[in-house]
Amino acid sequence: MQLIDGKTIALGIRADIQQEIARLKIRPGLAAILVGENPASKIYVRNKRKACEEAGIYSMEHSLPEETSEADLLSLIRKLNDNPAIHGILVQLPLPKSLNERKILDAVAPQKDIDGFHYMNVGKLTANESGFYPCTPLGVIALLKATDVKIAGLHAVVVGRSNIVGKPTALLLLHENVTVTLCHSKTQDLPQICQQADILVAAIGKARFVTAEMVKEGAVVIDVGINRTEDGKLVGDVDFESVAKKASAITPVPGGVGPMTIAMLLGNTLQAAKWALSNG
């Protein structure tokens, strides 16, 4: 069984990004917007800022109170869109329920939408055209490519249909010539479908949901979930101990997909800066 070490793979990607940034004529700039006091979001934004500094990316953070109005948030996004020193803008999700998430995400200029959430980038992903794609799904593909498995022609089952992870992961797998089944809460006979997977991607946010009985012998298992148990332990959507005995390769939690998400974010920010340079 191969343990897919996302931490080590991500460090290699980040080192390459750092070298490329050092040769770039401009310093890439990233602005993060955080609305409210979500503890997980605060940790994530802090980790992003640290990663940016290490890579040589200029990082700016806007922490706004929970009661921030939609008009004020849209005004901030417009200013960042117009700021030539900022090449990437990310709006940390989830937003407070008082704000229209779709309206906010579509206010970010598509060429600065490094999270790949703008409708234009969603369309480009669907059409397999060049654009910004969501970071976690990009990380999943990079992890699969880091294994010895030739994934073209294999059958992947993605459990979870969120716009942030499940759907874009399914599309990226399709673009790699993988046959994809996308499952969700209304899927019938889910364990039986999962047993057919050469590649099983778990992205539903339920601790240890995927058990050994749901996994085919020799499958590659990618665990996107991050869940905290009652005793404070971080676990994935996969019951790691039992599934690892059947899988040919598996990602751990933590240390699997998580570090890759930030590495892909840095890569998207670098790409945004390069596009800005080429478009004058």
Image (tube, rainbow, N blue to C red):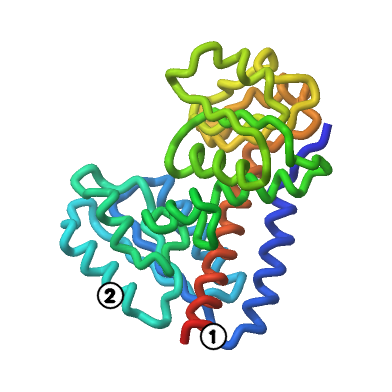
The answer to whether residue 199 shows anywhere in this view is: yes
State the image quarter where residue 106 is shown. Answer: bottom left
In the displayed structure, does residue 166 sit left or right of residue 142? left
Instruction: Indicate the secondary structure of the residue bearing disc 2.
Output: helix
State the image quarter where residue 147 is shown. Answer: top right
Q: Amino acid at mark 1?
A: Ile
Is 185 above or below relative to 65? Answer: above
Q: In percent of the image, x 61 and y 71: which residue is there?
A: 55
Query: How many other residues sit within 10 Å of disc 2, few (<14), some (14-19) or many (≥20)?
Result: few
Task: Residue 264 in the image: state x and y as whole percent.
Answer: 59, 58
Q: Which residue is mark 1?
A: 26
Q: In percent of the image, x 59 and y 51: which residue is there?
A: 138
Query: How many other residues sit within 10 Å of disc 1, few (<14), some (14-19) or many (≥20)?
Result: some
Outermost residue toward the front? 127
Of residues 175 and 266, the one drawn nearer to the viewer in this rendering: 175
Q: Determine the CA span between mark 1 and mark 2.
A: 20 Å
Task: Residue 210 in the image: state x and y as whole percent.
Answer: 60, 21
In the displayed structure, does residue 51 sit left or right of residue 12? left
Q: Amino acid at mark 2?
A: Lys
Task: Residue 41 in the image: state x and y as whole percent.
Answer: 41, 49
The answer to whether residue 134 shows anywhere in this view is: no
Q: In percent of the image, x 32 and y 61: which residue is there?
A: 63
Q: In percent of the image, x 42 and y 81: which residue is there?
A: 85
Of residues 239 and 181, the one drawn nearer to the viewer in this rendering: 181
Residue 79 circle label: 2
